[in-house]
Image (cartoon, helix red, strand yellow):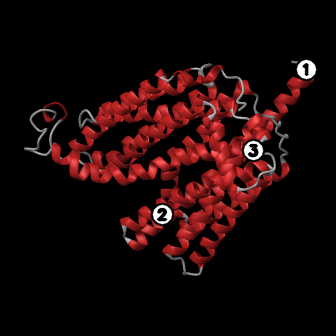
């Protein structure tokens, strides 16, 4: 590499860090507002159902709009896509603020605003993710993905505590003001910093679809693009299966903890788990992941399954804390390796469409987990391990009997399932060899 090329690479990386910093600050503001709104809804309604619906309005609109977002991101300037998305989110937040200050904020208006913000976030996140390849050389993609994970981990770790303090001290109006400041900072950086132009990679699949703007054809194209590479399809199916398991665990962990510890202790356990996420993100940011990234994905997938298994083994604070810490440490490492792998293997000019389909596959498994795991616990697993239940004198002698032990058994089953899914994926040879494929050219 010449001295001029090295200097140019450093400058481009500096621009990436500046943009990432702006996005991180905006993420903090959005996280504060989201927490404050959730709290306001629960305090005003006292309804767990309405509280849960807020999460639903965060999940369903992105699933529906992802194909459109992917098609637009591939065709439009990614910098301006991020600018317009941030502007849309800011206007939705302004809508909430105006209704709040006028005393007319209602549940339906929050649902509308949350839906708009979640849709804007789909466009924004796809544009930002696919823009990484124009800023970061392939050899640094793992580290860049780790840096992105660090920002998300910091928000998950500190936002609940910080928002809880700010709600009491500066109230909802102060949090909304902070959110607006972060939007303006993010927009200012995006307006100032220029994006390098992405390289166009001509491929057979792309040539056959040049100029096609119909959504149906874009979705078909994305699916054919993925299907043409069994290793890539195998990776996405593995991530979808893991997300189903992770989604189930996320619903069950607090109910299981509250059967034998106080809410304060449960919060402390989850906070320590959040530190695990931060540690995993820091490791990914510094290390960048193994050279064979698929080994990182599957290796930490095995470790995740072991941690899930251990979390259900006994109602022990120490054991469950260690298991949650280890499991959450795996999340950013798996996500960072998979993101770096996808960024390096999918042609830049079709990443929006392909990544949108990948997000649909991954996100669609979460509502399924939410739908099935509750009845599965209430009507199958918990009755198995009550005193005098069918498994009380067998499995119950090992993992215990009583409230929450059925959830523990389901943890064990899900942990074993995660391990088996990971081993099966490793035995799928096209997935084993995906790192050796230098480019994806269908």
Who's the residue at 37% across and 49% down the image?
Answer: 251
Say which of 425 and 83 sits in front: 425
Judge whether 35 appears above or below 331 on screen: below
How far, Cα to Cα, is label 3 from label 2?
Answer: 29 Å
Residue under label 3: 19
Helix or strand or loop: what does disc 1 sit on? helix
Judge whether 229 appears above or below 62 on screen: above
Residue under label 2: 54
Helix or strand or loop: what does disc 3 sit on? helix
Q: Which image quadrant is residue 93 in?
A: bottom right
Q: Residues within 10 Å of mark 3 (few under 14, many from 20)?
A: many
Is residue 244 something one can see in this rendering? yes
Q: Is residue 413 left or right of residue 403?
A: right
Q: Position of residue 283 (x, y in %)?
A: 57, 27
Label located before the other in sequence (3 or 2): 3
Who's the residue at 85% across and 45% down the image?
Answer: 194
Q: Residues within 10 Å of mark 1 (few under 14, many from 20)?
A: few
Q: Position of residue 305 (x, y in %)?
A: 39, 30
Label located before the other in sequence (1 or 3): 1
Residue under label 1: 3
Judge whether 112 appears above or below 340 on screen: below
Helix or strand or loop: what does disc 2 sit on? helix
Q: Position of residue 387 (x, y in %)?
A: 9, 44
Is residue 24 something one can see in this rendering? no
Judge whether 195 appears above or below 173 on screen: above
Q: Position of residue 89 (x, y in %)?
A: 66, 62
Who's the residue at 70% across and 41% down the image?
Answer: 351
Contact? badges 3 and 2 (CB < 8 Å)? no
Q: Which image quadrant is residue 232 in?
A: top right
Q: Is residue 328 left or right of residue 91?
A: left
């Amino acid at each position: 590499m010449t001295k001029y090329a090295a200097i140019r690479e450093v400058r481009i990386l500096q621009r990436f860090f500046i943009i990432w910093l702006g996005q991180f600050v905006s993420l903090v503001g959005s996280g504060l507002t989201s927490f404050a709104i959730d709290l306001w809804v629960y305090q005003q309604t006292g309804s767990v159902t309405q509280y849960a619906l807020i999460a639903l309005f965060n999940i369903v609109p992105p699933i529906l709009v992802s194909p459109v977002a992917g098609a637009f991101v591939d065709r439009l300037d990614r910098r301006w896509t991020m600018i317009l998305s941030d502007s849309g989110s800011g206007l939705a937040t302004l809508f909430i603020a105006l209704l709040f200050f006028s005393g007319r904020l209602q549940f339906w208006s929050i649902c509308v605003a949350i839906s708009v913000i979640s849709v804007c976030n789909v466009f924004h996140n796809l544009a930002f993710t696919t823009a990484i390849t124009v800023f970061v050389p392939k050899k640094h993609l793992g580290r860049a993905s780790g840096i992105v994970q660090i920002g998300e981990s910091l928000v998950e770790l500190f936002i609940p505590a910080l928002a809880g303090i700010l709600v009491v001290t500066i109230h909802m109006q102060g949090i909304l003001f902070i959110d607006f400041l972060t939007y303006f900072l993010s927009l200012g950086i995006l307006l100032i910093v220029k994006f390098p132009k992405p390289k166009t990679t001509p491929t057979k699949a792309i040539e056959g679809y040049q100029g096609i703007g119909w959504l149906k054809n874009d979705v078909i194209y994305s699916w054919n693009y993925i299907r043409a590479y069994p290793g890539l399809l195998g990776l996405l199916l593995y991530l979808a299966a893991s997300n189903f398991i992770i989604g189930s665990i996320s619903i069950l962990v607090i109910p299981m903890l509250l059967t034998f510890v106080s809410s304060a202790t449960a919060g402390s356990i989850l906070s320590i788990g959040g530190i695990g996420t931060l540690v995993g993100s820091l490791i990914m940011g510094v290390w960048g992941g193994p050279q064979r990234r698929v080994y990182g994905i599957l290796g930490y997938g095995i470790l995740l399954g072991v941690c899930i298994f251990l979390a259900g083994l006994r109602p022990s604070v120490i054991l469950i804390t260690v298991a949650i810490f280890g499991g959450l440490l795996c999340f950013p490492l798996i996500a960072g390796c998979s993101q770096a792998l996808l960024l390096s293997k999918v042609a830049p000019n079709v990443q929006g469409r392909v990544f949108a389909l990948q997000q649909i596959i991954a996100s669609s498994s979460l509502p399924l987990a939410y739908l099935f795991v509750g009845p599965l616990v209430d009507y199958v697993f918990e009755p198995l391990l009550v005193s005098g239940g069918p498994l009380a004198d067998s499995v119950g002698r090992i993992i215990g009997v009583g409230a929450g032990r059925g959830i523990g058994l389901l943890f064990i089953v899900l942990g074993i399932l995660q391990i088996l899914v990971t081993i099966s994926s490793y035995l799928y040879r096209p997935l084993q060899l995906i790192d050796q494929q230098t480019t994806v050219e269908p």
